[in-house]
Amino acid sequence: MAAIPSMTDRGTLNRGTEDRGLPPAVPQRLALGSMPPLPARSTAPILAMATTLAQNAYLANHIYSTASQAQRKLQIDFEIMGRNWNNGSHIDMTNANYLKDLIVVASNRVKAAVSTKAKGIQFFIIKGGGEGFLDSWLQNVDASRVIAGGATTANSGGQFIFDRNDLLIAFDPQGNFISSAKLIRPIVITTVANSRPKKIWTEYTANRVYNAWDKRPVSIYRNNNYLIEYLGLRVDDSLGYYSSGRARIDIHKEEQTNGCIFIVDPNTPPVSQKVQLDLFEPKFIIDVLASVGKKPADIRSSMHLGIMHMIDIK
């Protein structure tokens, strides 16, 4: 049975082990069928090397960062693939069966699962669930705390800290897969005013809102109050922050943010292409709307969609 690797083992072959235990080379003069039987133990290094090669191939195509959830997510994925690296293709964020297994295993503290008799769309955010599906440049950094530049809705530049390793998933009321996407969540936003830094979004508030989303209603609405128009998923948090206006955090396409969470879509136009970006919506939003017989142009007022479930990989 293959061992679960540590994060420091990625891409590393054990030097010198590939020939250990193999019998001496067979002389050319031996007739076919005359080679003596190999000792049973001699296959162990071959199997070990095959396992290591399969492991390396898996880790070359499934990127995990150095975040605290990464090692646990790798362990979960290894269990789901039957502890066999050759089954690595099963670990796919568009594979409905894998995602259902991930939801069950990752939620061992709350026992969440996809229902076949839900009253609306079943949304899941798995904190750390994006590990294994990250861009290659995140491999050697903590993807839950990425420092980068950005712009607020007032077009003010600043320094952001983003959490980039969460996964958003949607299933319909009957448990059929709709869509999935990685998220980019700002946890700290610092702007500069009069040559002095000003923190306009804090990690305390960002996490407090996020943690108040479990089992809360999700709706979609059109927001045209800012430079970029978007369709936003609104979660009615249990603290009443959204309804009171204290902190209104939507989930929407990548653009500018004062705290809203981005849906990753490689086809998202840059902010500089305003006309194209206004018209664009991520595949996740289009898929969710299609599941209820709607298109982005149909959304002019708020529409209830379903319930959010929050899962934390620990």
Image: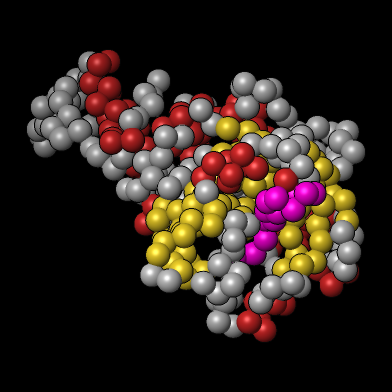
Q: Residue at x 76, y 72 (%)?
A: 224
Q: Tell me where residue 266 sits by quadrant.
A: bottom right
The way the protein has been coloured in the rendering is secondary structure
Placement of 294 over or under 170, stated as above or below: below
**How many labels, in total?**
0
Q: Residue at x 38, y 70 (%)?
A: 195
Q: Who is closer to the viewer here, 248 or 181?
A: 248
Q: Tell me where residue 53 sits by quadrant.
A: top left
Placement of 281 over or under 276, stated as above or below: above
Q: Who is closer to the viewer here, 2 or 150?
A: 150
Q: Residue at x 54, y 31 (%)?
A: 313
Give the quarter of the figure containing the N terminus. top left
In the rendered structure, does residue 173 fall within the stretch colored magenta?
no
Where residue 125 appears, as percent x and y from the top left, is 65, 42
Q: Which residues are magenta?
A: 242-256
Q: Horizontally, is 45 left or right of 311 in the view?
A: left
Placement of 207 over or under 250, stated as above or below: above
Where residue 21 appears, as percent x and y from the top left, is 16, 22
Q: Horizontally, is 71 left or right of 185 in the view?
A: left
Q: Who is closer to the viewer here, 63 or 250?
A: 250
Residue 226 shows in the view: yes
Q: Residue furthest front?
A: 194
In the rendered structure, does residue 247 fall within the stretch colored magenta?
yes
Q: Horizontally, is 70 left or right of 215 in the view?
A: left
Where residue 165 appears, as percent x and y from the top left, is 50, 46
Q: Residue at x 15, y 35 (%)?
A: 15
Q: Horizontally, is 29 left or right of 168 in the view?
A: left
Residue 99 shows in the view: no
Q: Who is closer to the viewer here, 35 or 76?
A: 76
Q: Tell me where residue 109 sits by quadrant.
A: top right
Where residue 79 appears, as percent x and y from the top left, is 51, 26
